[in-house]
Image: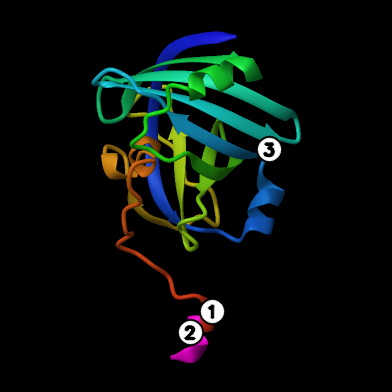
Amino acid sequence: MNSNSLEIERRFLILRPPEPELAARCSHVYHMEQTYLLSPPHQTERVRRREGADGVAFFHTVKIDRSAITRLEQEEEITPEAYDAYLTRRDPMTETIRKTRYCLPEGPYTFEIDFYPFWPHCAVMEIELPREDAPFRFPDGITVVRELTGDRRFSNAALSRHIPCLLYTSPSPRDAHES
């Protein structure tokens, strides 16, 4: 399957909801590895390994920015052998991003919530929209800290190069008891 389409996406930094409760509400949960490849300027190229209840799948994706919200995206499912071949083109300035993705249906949309091992209290939630000004409602039980749309520091490609410190951190229950 090869798709070439516009991706209109908004991204948000959220407080990390309790994992068991979130998983119970989700249509899919995936463990993912994303590796960024050497690519020309103004273009992002990556490969992804995705594992879930429906098995393991591999994808090759190229994205070209059109605006802060919209990108041209070409994505195709590939074989494990093609995935390994693409890995030989890994950008040496990047690390592979590992995350768990929760797919949370809400009305006509599915919110994708990514838990990263390097942020214990926050996560990134994204939604793909049919147009840039499409209205939507946040899922119940999700606390939005701030919008990340257009903030390149929080793109997965940027995270593969450098993990930014978050302006928001929540004390752990242990820290609260020690105060």
Name which residue lies at 39% across and 31% down: 9
Say which of 115 and 67 sits in front: 115
Q: Quadrant of residue 100?
A: top right
Q: Quadrant of the C terminus?
A: bottom left
Per the model, the C-alpha gap separating discs 2 and 1 is 5 Å
Q: Which residues are magenta?
A: 175-179
Q: Residues within 10 Å of mark 1 (few under 14, many from 20)?
A: few
Is residue 176 part of the magenta span, yes or no?
yes
Question: What kind of residue is marked 2?
Answer: Ala
> Which residue: 54% across, 44% down?
99
Q: CA distance from mark 2 to mark 3?
A: 34 Å
- Type of amino acid at the residue the image marks with label 1: Pro
Q: Is residue 88 left or right of residue 148?
A: right
Tags 2 and 1 touching, CB below 8 Å: yes
Q: How many marks?
A: 3
In this rendering, does residue 151 appear at all? no
Marks 3/1: CA–CA distance: 29 Å
Q: Which residue is mark 1?
A: 173
Residue 21 percent location from the top left of the image: 67, 57
- Kindly identify the amino acid type of the residue bearing the numbered disc 3: Ser
Name the disc covering residue 27, or none. Answer: 3
Q: Badge 2 is on which residue?
A: 176
Image quarter where the N terminus lies is top right
What secondary structure characterizes most of the magenta part?
Answer: helix
Describe residue 1's horizontal placement relative to residue 153 as left or right.
right
Give the residue displayed 34% in from the left and 44% down from the top: 154
| Residue 100's disc number | none
Q: Report which quarter residue 50 is drawn in.
A: top right
The first of marks 2 and 3 along the sequence is: 3
